[in-house]
């Protein structure tokens, strides 16, 4: 299993805009079949997680991610999951499979499909999971790992992400050391060759 590190988008970068199909539209009361960045303008912070269904690194953190998201959404933090994998070559990551996974795991956040992979390129996402945290002005405050654990080791807990969110919410900035995320590479379509990947 090849392991890829996140590219660590430059801090202070503005969150790239998006409008994407949502696999679990009943997760909130916004209605419709898509979700956009602007739908969450009121959030104190925004956590964007590039993820997928089949990656063992995502499966490893999945339950802890649901717990962390549930806890911090009560503090005004919005989480968003985005799957950018090529669903033709990886049918486990199809839109239908995304909907089934979101329901089975009771995702408390919208799970969006980036079928064109344009959003992954805009965010320079490289692996799953790939985590970015944007402040209230939607500038990048943290990018890196969920925690230090790996699939063959200790249970995931999300300590790194929680520390980043605590610092951002309580102090207005993230001052901790930021280390890249690790996981499976995003499964790019054959005709997509992003410069950062």
Image: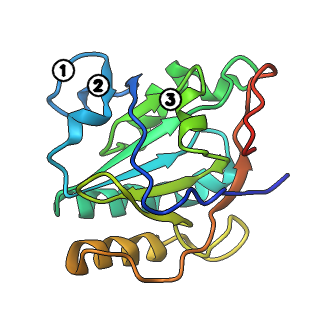
Binning the other alpha carbons within 10 Å of mark 1 as few (below 14), some (14 to 19) or many (20 upward) gives few
Closer to viewer: mark 1 or mark 3: 1
Disc on res. 79: none
Residue at numbered disc 2: 25
Q: Is residue 45 above or below residue 105?
A: below
Q: Is residue 56 above or below residue 68?
A: above
User: Residue at 59% across / 52% down in the picture?
Assistant: 129
Residue 66 or residue 37, whichever sits in front: 37
Disc on res. 98: 3
Q: How far across and how far down the image is residue 197, in percent? A: 75, 44
- Measure how far apart labels 1 and 3 are at the Cα level: 18 Å
Q: Which quarter of the picture shows residue 90?
A: top right
Disc on res. 31: 1
User: Residue at 42% across / 60% down in the picture?
Assistant: 12
Q: Earlier in the sequence, mark 1 or mark 3?
A: 1
Q: Secondary structure at mark 1?
A: loop
User: Residue at 54% across / 70% down in the picture?
Assistant: 156
Residue 42 appears in the picture as rendered? yes
Q: Secondary structure at mark 2?
A: helix
């Amino acid at each position: 299993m090849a392991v890829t590190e996140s590219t660590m988008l430059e801090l202070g970068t503005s969150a790239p805009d998006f409008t994407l199909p949502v696999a679990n539209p009943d997760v909130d009361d916004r209605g419709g079949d898509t979700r956009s960045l602007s739908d969450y303008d009121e959030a104190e912070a925004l956590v964007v997680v590039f993820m997928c269904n089949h990656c063992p690194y995502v499966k490893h953190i999945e339950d802890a991610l649901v717990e962390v998201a549930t806890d911090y959404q009560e503090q005004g933090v919005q989480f968003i999951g985005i799957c950018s994998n090529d669903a033709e070559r990886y049918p486990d990551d199809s839109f239908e499979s995304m909907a089934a996974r979101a329901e089975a795991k009771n995702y408390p956040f919208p799970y969006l499909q980036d079928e064109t992979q344009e959003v992954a390129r805009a965010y320079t996402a490289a692996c799953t999971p790939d985590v970015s945290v944007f402040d209230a002005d939607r500038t990048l405050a943290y990018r890196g790992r969920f925690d230090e654990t790996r699939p063959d080791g200790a249970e995931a807990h999300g300590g790194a992400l929680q520390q980043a969110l605590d610092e951002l919410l309580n102090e207005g900035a993230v001052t901790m050391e930021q280390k890249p995320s690790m996981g499976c590479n995003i499964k790019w379509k054959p005709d997509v060759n992003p410069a950062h990947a």
